[in-house]
Image (spheres, rainbow, N blue to C red):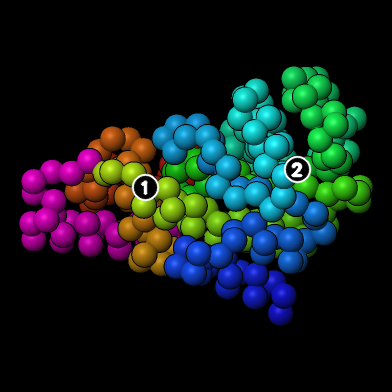
Amino acid sequence: MAFGAAALQLSLSFESHTSICDPFLQVLPVNAAAVCTLGAPFGSETVCASNSMAAHFDELQFDLGEGPSWAALATRRAVLVDNFPTSRGTTWPALMKASEHSGVHAVYAFPLILGSLEIGAVSLHSNRSGGLSPAQILDAEVLVNLTAVQVLRRSLTFQTLKTNLEDNEGYSRRVVHQATGMVLAQLNLSAADALLIIHGHAFAHGRTVREVASDVVTRRLDFASISES
């Protein structure tokens, strides 16, 4: 019941303006959470942090360009570090040094990915060892997938998409509608999320929505193949 409530809160967070960090704290054995975008095209910023420790740890990762969040996004895999002060010292030496007094004991970073879009990461922090169970990791991944949609919606709200004069014409609307259906089938998403993928891809590559939709319809662009590569 708690997990269902957390998932519902995340699904509605954009419309309801609620925290996208709190649902993780409600169902997982962690003390803090942060959600961030990383690198181009959305920039590096903390979208949400449940406390100052999580926000500070994100800032260190931005400044140094290294850490679990960067690694999770680069590998498209969760990075689970149960004892951060003594683990992976040679992997993130600058971060290890800078975070000595941060209070971070364990950190679990999950990539924020939607189709071909690499958006950022969710980092979860704990002040105790023990790690996450396989079931808890699966729960976290489901919540992270929901978070990716919300972060992309938020990011595109504040961005300007490249447009063509023809973008409001009937042909363009038909192409976008057809492409949305194809992406829906490729990635098993809702129509709204499939359209969001098309918009996000257009913004990330400096193209118009119509141009991306045309590539999908003519099968020059297959989001399923991109996401699996």
Q: Is residue 173 left or right of residue 100?
A: left
Q: Disc 2 on helix, strand or loop?
A: helix
Q: Nearer the viewer, residue 84 or 197?
A: 84
In x, y percent, where is residue 216? 27, 49
**As shown in the figure, which amino acid type bears the numbered disc 1?**
Phe
x 32%, y 51%: residue: 198
**Location of mark 1 (residue):** 158
Counting residues from the start of the chain, the first of labels 2 and 1 encountered is 2
- Of the pair 35 and 185, the residue shown nearer to us: 35
The disc at residue 53 is 2
Decide: is 179 above or below 209.
Answer: below
Q: Is residue 110 left or right of residue 105?
A: left
Q: Where in the figure is residue 195, as x and y percent of width and height?
A: 33, 58
Describe residue 206's horizontal placement relative to residue 127 as left or right: left
Residue 167: in magenta span? yes
Main secondary structure type of the part rendered in magenta? helix
Residue at the bottom extreme of this rendering:
1
Q: What residue lies at 74% left-to-right and 20% top-to-bottom? A: 94
Relative to 82, say whether 197 is above or below: below
Q: Quadrant of residue 66?
A: top right
Under mark 2, the amino acid is Met
Segment colored magenta: 162-188
- Residue at 58% in and 73% down: 8
What residue is rendered at 44% in x and 38% in y?
Answer: 42
Q: Is residue 17 above or below residue 151?
A: below
Magenta segment: does it hold 211?
A: no
